[in-house]
C-alpha cells in the first residue's frame, strides 16, 4: 500500500427533514449569503420554500442567483462573482446537483481573486482563498458535495476544465434522499454511471497491495448497481434512494483512493465530449468507460477478471482469465443499456469529425504528455478509444 493522507472535512447531515437545519448550519459560516441554484427543480419540489424559511429563522440575509445550467457556464460564474462583491456576501449556499455546487465553488474562489477566475482552470493561478460554502444536494452523482473539485464550461473557448483545492470543500452537505424522488429516470441513470465511474477511476490502479480499498470499491459498485435498478423501478422508495445518495458521496470523498494511484483518463476524455456536444457527463462516461476498458485491459488482465468476478459474479476462468475479464466489461455495458444509457457515440449522433481535435485537447495543450497511470495514453491511444466508442 502506498503512503497516503486522507482528509475530508465536510460535515455530512443525512436523512429525512435535514433541510430544515440549513439555517442553523449556514449561520456558523455567514451572515449574508448567496443562494445559488439551477433552473427550477428545487422550486417545484418545495425545497426552495423550506430553505428560505430555515434561513429566515436563522436571521440570515439572502441574495439569490438561480439559473445554473447542466455543464455549468463561466458566464454565470462571473455574474455571481460580481454580485457577491457588490453585496458583500460572506458565504455561499448551493442547492441542487453537481452543476449548482460547482458553479458555487467557482464563484467562491473567484470573489477574493484579483484576476480572471478562468486562470484557475487554465492552471495559471493557484487558489489561495475562497468564500465558505454549504450545500444541499438533490442529485446523487458527482460527489461534489464533499469534493475539492469544480468543473466549469467556458463556451466562448469551447473548453470544460476542472480546478481544485481543499478550500473548495463544502463546510457541510445536507443530503435528504426524499428530494431525489422527483429525479427523472435519465438523471438517476446518469448519476449512477458517474458514481460508478468515480469508483472505477480508482479501482483500475497499478497498485497491487491495496486489498481493503479494493473491497470497499467493490462493495460500493455492487450497491450502486443494485439500488439504481430498484430506484428506477420505484422512484419514491426511500431505501434505494438513500443508498444511492450515500454511495455518491463515498465514491468521490477520497476514501476509495487511499493507498493507491488513481486513473482519471476517462473523465478527461469525457469532458471533451461535454465541452464539444453539451451532453450529460454520466451519459458521456457510459460511452467512454467500456471503450477504455476494452483498449487497456491487457495491461492487467487479472485485475479486470477480479472486477468481473467480485462485482458481477462472473465465474473465474483460471485457464483463461481473459475470458472472465472480457465478460466483466460486457456486463458493465449490459448494465448501462439496462438503465437506458447510451454506450456508443453514434447513439448520441456523434461521428468521426471532431475525434482528432478532442483527442489532442485532452492534454490541455500538452500533446507530448500522457494521460492516466494504469495505461498512460498518448493522443493516438485516445483517438483509438474514441473510435472504439463509435
Ligand atoms: O437545474 P435544475 O432545475 O435543478 O435541474 C437539474 C438539471 O436539469 C436536474 N435536477 C437536479 N436535482 C433534481 C433535478 N430534477 C428533478 N429532481 C431533482 N431532485 O438534473 C439536471 C442535471 O443536474 P446537474 O447538476 O447538471 O447534474 P449532475 O449532478 O450530474 O452534475 C453534473 C456536473 O458536475 C460535474 C460534471 O462534469 C457536470 O458538469 N462534475 C463535478 C465533479 C466535482 N465537482 O467533483 C466531479 C464529476 O466527475 C463531474 O465532472
Ligand atoms: Zn464524474
Image: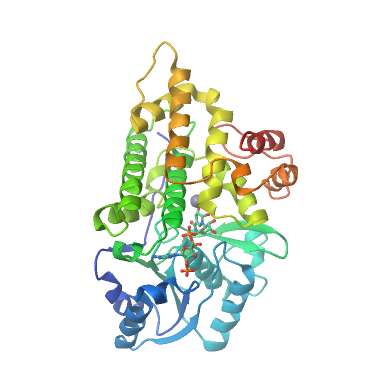
Residue 333, given in percent of the width and then of the height, sits at 48, 36
* Nearer to us in this view, 112 or 83: 83
Report which quarter residue 121 is drawn in: bottom right
* Residue 153 visible, this orientation: yes
Residue 374, given in percent of the width and then of the height, sits at 54, 33
Q: Quadrant of the N terminus?
A: top left
Color scheme of the displayed model = rainbow
Residue drawn at x 63%, y 68% is 74
- Whether residue 332 is situated above or below residue 246 in the rendered picture: above
Disc tally is: 0
Residue 23, given in percent of the width and then of the height, sits at 32, 80
- Whether residue 31 is situated above or below residue 292 in the rendered picture: below
Relative to 94, is 237 on the left or the right? left
* Residue 207 visible, this orientation: no
Residue furthest top as drawn: 319
Report which quarter residue 353 is drawn in: top right
* Nearer to us in this view, 72 or 163: 72
Relative to 133, is 352 on the left or the right? right
- Whether residue 190 is situated above or below residue 385 in the rendered picture: below
Q: Quadrant of the C terminus?
A: top right
* Nearer to us in this view, 276 or 214: 276
Residue drawn at x 43%, y 51% is 189
Relative to 353, is 315 on the left or the right? left
Residue 255, given in percent of the width and then of the height, sits at 37, 47
Relative to 76, is 142 on the left or the right? left
Report which quarter residue 86 is drawn in: bottom right
Amino acid at each position: 500500500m502506498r503512503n497516503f493522507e486522507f482528509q475530508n472535512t465536510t460535515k455530512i447531515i443525512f436523512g429525512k427533514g435535514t433541510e430544515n437545519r440549513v439555517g442553523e448550519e449556514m449561520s456558523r459560516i455567514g451572515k449574508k449569503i448567496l443562494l445559488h441554484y439551477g433552473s427550477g427543480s428545487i422550486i417545484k419540489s418545495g425545497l426552495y420554500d423550506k430553505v428560505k424559511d430555515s434561513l429566515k429563522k436563522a436571521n440570515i440575509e439572502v441574495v439569490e442567483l438561480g439559473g445554473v445550467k447542466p455543464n455549468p457556464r463561466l458566464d454565470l460564474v462571473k455574474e455571481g462573482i460580481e454580485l457577491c462583491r457588490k453585496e458583500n456576501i460572506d458565504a455561499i449556499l448551493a442547492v441542487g446537483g453537481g452543476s449548482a455546487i460547482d458553479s458555487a465553488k467557482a464563484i467562491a474562489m473567484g470573489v477574493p481573486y484579483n484576476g480572471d477566475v478562468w486562470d484557475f482552470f487554465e492552471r495559471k493561478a493557484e487558489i489561495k482563498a475562497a468564500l465558505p460554502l454549504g450545500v444541499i444536494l438533490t442529485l446523487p452523482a458527482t460527489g461534489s458535495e464533499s469534493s475539492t473539485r469544480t468543473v466549469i464550461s467556458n463556451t466562448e473557448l469551447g473548453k470544460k476544465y476542472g480546478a481544485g483545492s481543499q478550500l473548495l470543500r463544502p463546510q457541510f452537505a445536507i443530503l435528504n434522499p426524499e428530494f431525489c424522488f422527483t429525479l427523472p429516470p435519465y438523471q438517476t441513470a446518469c448519476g449512477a454511471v458517474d458514481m460508478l465511474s468515480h469508483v472505477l477511476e480508482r479501482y483500475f490502479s497499478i497498485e497491487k497491495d491495496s486489498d481493503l480499498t479494493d473491497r470497499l470499491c467493490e462493495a460500493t459498485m455492487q450497491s450502486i448497481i443494485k439500488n439504481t435498478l430498484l430506484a428506477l423501478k420505484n422512484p419514491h422508495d426511500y431505501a434505494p434512494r438513500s443508498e444511492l445518495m450515500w454511495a455518491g458521496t463515498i465514491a468521490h470523498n477520497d476514501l476509495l483512493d487511499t493507498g493507491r494511484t488513481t486513473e482519471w483518463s476517462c473523465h478527461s476524455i469525457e469532458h471533451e465530449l461535454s465541452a464539444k456536444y453539451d451532453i450529460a457527463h454520466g451519459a458521456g462516461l457510459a460511452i467512454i468507460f467500456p471503450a477504455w476498458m476494452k483498449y487497456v485491459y491487457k495491461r492487467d488482465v487479472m485485475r479486470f477478471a477480479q472486477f468481473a468476478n467480485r462485482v458481477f459474479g462472473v465465474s473465474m476462468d483460471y485457464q483463461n482469465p481473459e475470458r472472465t475479464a472480457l465478460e466483466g466489461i460486457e456486463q458493465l455495458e449490459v448494465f448501462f443499456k439496462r438503465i437506458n444509457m447510451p454506450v456508443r457515440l453514434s447513439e448520441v449522433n456523434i461521428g468521426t469529425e471532431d475525434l482528432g481535435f478532442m483527442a489532442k485537447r485532452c492534454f490541455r495543450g500538452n500533446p507530448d504528455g500522457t494521460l492516466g497511470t494504469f495505461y498512460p495514453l498518448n493522443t493516438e491511444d485516445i483517438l483509438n478509444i474514441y473510435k472504439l466508442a463509435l
